[in-house]
Image: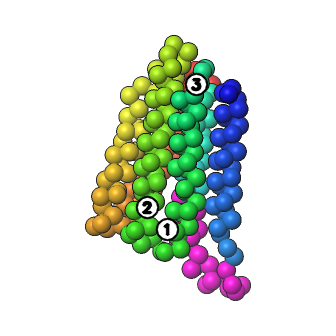
Amino acid sequence: MTKARLEAFSDGVIAIIITIMVLELKPPHGSGIAVLRDLLPIFGSYVLSFVYVGIYWSNHHHLLIAAKKINGLVLWANLHLLFWLSLVPFVTAWMGENNYEAVPIALYGIVLLMCSISYWLLVKTLTRIGHDNEALTKAIGSDRKGKISTAIYVIALALTCVQSGISLALYILVALMWLIPDRRIENRIGG
């Protein structure tokens, strides 16, 4: 498989994930502005997840631009990431439908944690290919931001038992951290 085919397949899956999420937004019964109030948790969950999927799409794009070579392990690592991302619509809907209760927030956090771990595995698989992906390896560096994000997910999961609202706030914090563009790869490869 070529790198371009991997990118096209991944882009298609991510587009479907976003489409599934938006299809979960059902119009309310009634025409008054007050009926929208009940949809706020559902819409808030959608916005947060849309941002997360967008962050993964953008970083995946940069990752594959910097990679010069892929192999079979990269294909499986990429599928692993796409598997966890494909669960985002389910946990998004469940969390919003249940007004941010602890168990749905915990499952949402588990999926975010697994997305983070699977992305890290994809990066490690790409950087271990060798000299062909040396620019990528140098651009990633120690991946401090990725490690901090993963640590925050673990802390958020532990706090779900105590105060699920804090966990949700930590998930939002990680998303905000990644909204600031990560320019490591762009700076390294000049684009």
Residue drawn at point x = 41 percent, y = 32 percent: 143
- Asked if 169 appears above or below 7 in the picture, the reply is below
Q: Which residue is mark 1?
A: 95
Q: Is residue 126 visible?
A: yes
- Colour scheme of this structure image? rainbow
Q: Which residues are magenta?
A: 28-48
Quadrant of the image containing the C terminus: top right
Element under disc 1: helix
Residue 154 is marked as none
Is mark 2 in CB contact (under 8 Å) with mark 1? yes
The image position of residue 129, as x and y in percent, is: 51, 20
**3D distance between C-alphas at marks 2 and 1:** 9 Å
> Please, what is the three-letter code of the amino acid marked with disc 1?
Met
Front label number (2 vs 1): 2
Q: Which residue is mark 2?
A: 107
Q: Quadrant of residue 40?
A: bottom right
Of callouts 3 and 1, which one flags the residue occurring earlier in the amino acid sequence?
A: 3
**3D distance between C-alphas at marks 3 and 1:** 37 Å
Element under disc 3: loop
Q: Looking at the image, which is closer to me, 139 or 115?
A: 115
Residue drawn at point x = 62 percent, y = 83 percent: 35
Q: Looking at the image, which is closer to me, 80 or 16?
A: 80
Locate residue 163 relative to residue 105 in the image: left or right: left
Residue drawn at point x = 55 percent, y = 36 percent: 76
